[in-house]
Image (cartoon, rainbow, N blue to C red):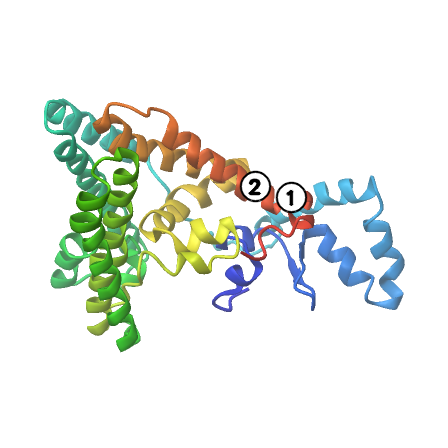
Amino acid sequence: MQTPGTAARLGVTEARLFEEMWVQRPDGRVISGVRAWSELMRSVWWLWPLGVLLGAPGISVIAQIVYRWIARNRYCFSSCKIPLRRSAGLRAGDVLCLVVVIATIMFIGWAWPAWVFMWALGVSLGLFGKWLTWRDARRVNLEIRLLRLIGWFLLWPGMDGRAFFATKRAPFPLLREWFVTIFKLGLGICLIWFVGPRWLSEQPLALGWCGMVGIVLVLHFGMFQLLSLAWRSCGVNAAPIMYRPLAATSLAQLWSERWNTAFSIPSRRLLLLPLTRRVGVNAASFAVFAASGFLHELVISIPARGGYGLPTAYFLLQGAGVWFERTNAGRALGLGAGI
């Protein structure tokens, strides 16, 4: 479980990885919980009857309930009195501060041009996230030097403060990464300033998509990636916020490890893990997707004065997909284990 990449190999999130036992068969099929116990027991001749019993209809349901209860309370059975160090999560003061920031920007900028209003909201939310993740890095007693702190707030869009402020030097990036990043940046510039205006000016929907793809290539896969390369060249662990999303083999892996880790990493530490202890992983996952939808409503629907509810519906649909690929039906269809 401690081996890097295990969660990606199994097609689950890191939080899900530590909830129960996992077994991966030689054919690649992944099973967990009581089903994993049953599988292992049936491979040992003297435990075979117990493995069959655990897999029997009715008994497997009861065994699963007992297993879940033991897994949730496994830290409580030890006689060790050392308190667990849990993620701090969001505090009431954090939520109040966020509400004040949003209300202030909306009050001041309501009459601004839509694009200015959007950027004001986006930058304000980004700085708020920066503050939360900087505080998280301080909570784990990392040494934070002034110059790196300034770079954290002004020259890096990522939100993994624990990695950014760590003293361990990051590997030097390959030259190939520079060429690929510059190519993506150039492609985005071409889409925004040449392809769209010249050939799609009479087709608003196509022009909008061309602009959206171009912006993502220029910012997320271009400028942000160049900043990652520059920081890593200096030995700072600033992993790309977009990590080969087309290589994802499951929705869970896409949203937790490959697409916009500037949101997924802090949301996992500040929302998913604390909520999982209270309401379980499925409800916690839906809460994170709903939070993502809410933030997109703020920076897209409100400045655009339209499309209300669509970003939230989109991310709740993604949450439903992540949930379904974990079910027995989803696994039977081969979801969560390939393109």
Work out whether 96 lies above or below 289: above
**SS under mark 2:** helix
Q: Residue at x 34, y 31 (%)?
A: 294
Foreground of the two, 24 or 15: 24
The N terminus: image quadrant: bottom right
Name which residue type carries label 1.
Thr
Q: Which residue is mark 2?
A: 323
Q: Which residue is mark 1?
A: 327
For residue 25, the mark is none
Residue 226: give x, y in percent of width and height: 21, 63
Q: Residue at x 69, y 45 (%)?
A: 328
Residue 269: give x, y in percent of width and height: 39, 48
Q: Residue at x 25, y 40 (%)?
A: 207
Left or right: residue 120 compared with residue 27: left
Q: Is residue 85 visible?
A: no
**SS under mark 1:** loop
Left or right: residue 275 compared with residue 137: right
Q: Are marks 2 and 1 in contact (CB under 8 Å)?
A: yes
Q: Quadrant of the rendered structure where residue 147 is?
A: bottom left
Q: Quadrant of the rendered structure where residue 97 is?
A: top left
Residue 315: give x, y in percent of width and height: 43, 36
Q: Is residue 231 visible?
A: yes
At label 1, counting other C-alpha atoms closer than 10 Å, the crowd grade (few under 14, some 14-19, many 20 or more) is few
